[in-house]
Image (cartoon, grey):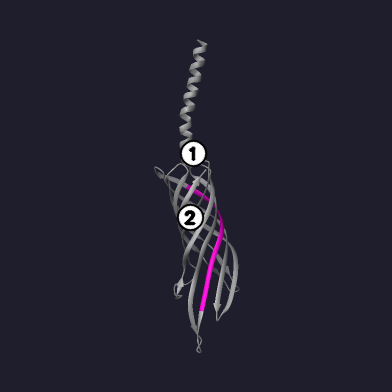
Amino acid sequence: MKLIKIVCTVGLLGASSVFSIPAALAVSAMGEHTFYVGGSIGEAGYRAFPSRVPNIDDKDTGYKIYGGYQIDKNWGVETTYFDLGKATVHDSVNNGFAITPVYASIGATAWGFAGTFTTPIYNNVSLFGKIGLIRSELKARASIRGVDNQAKEFSTGVNFGLGAKYDFTRNFVIRAEWERLEMQVNNQMSTVNSDVDFLSAGITYKF
């Protein structure tokens, strides 16, 4: 009788472990306790220039490389490197004697660290939000009459965004998002905001 009890107990334990394995895989597939890396490409829109400035191209192609850790089904952390291209102005100035071509540009790169919140909405589709801090480097250039002036500015600002993602396999995820990166340029007279809106799409790999 004792032997039968032992066999039954071992059998029940074995069955429970067999059923627990798919459950654990399902939890992992949902993104809990997962490291991930990825990359996205999209359009960066610079908000530094007034709308009345003529001959301005305030949008450029940007990209980002990121990695993170999903703490549980909802909460995670993420670090990102951004390269946001540059905005340019091509114009001319008439000083009464001649027309002088003018060129100016501003470009940005940044490192960011953010907390993320994810909520599933349907099957493998989820919405997510993020908020954190960035350390950005702004590079400005102006050229008039062949005289080239360049400057570089570092600033710390807020990065926040919203997006959606789709887990199309256990390891690969498609994501699309909008982000705002807040940057500033300081001069002797005032502080100028040079925020960038970044709309991107990319692929994430989960380990």
Percent of width and height locating residue 148: 58, 76
Question: Can you say whether 193 is above or below 200 in the image?
Answer: below
What is the distance, in whole Å, between disc 1 and disc 2 at their CAs?
23 Å
- Residue 202 in view: yes
Q: Quadrant of residue 81?
A: bottom right
Q: Which residue is mark 1?
A: 28
Residue occupying the point 53% across, 61% down = 83
Q: Amino acid at mark 2?
A: Ser
Label 2 sits on a secondary structure element that is strand
Task: Of the two numbered discs 1 and 2 on the same chain, state the one appearing first in sequence.
Answer: 1
Which element is circle 1 on? helix
Check disc 2: other Cα within 10 Å, few if <14, some if 14-19, many if 20+. Answer: many
Comparing 87 with 163, the one in front is: 87
Q: Is residue 11 magenta?
A: no
- Farthest residue to the top: give it: 1
Q: Quadrant of residue 156?
A: bottom right
Q: Which residues are magenta?
A: 102-117
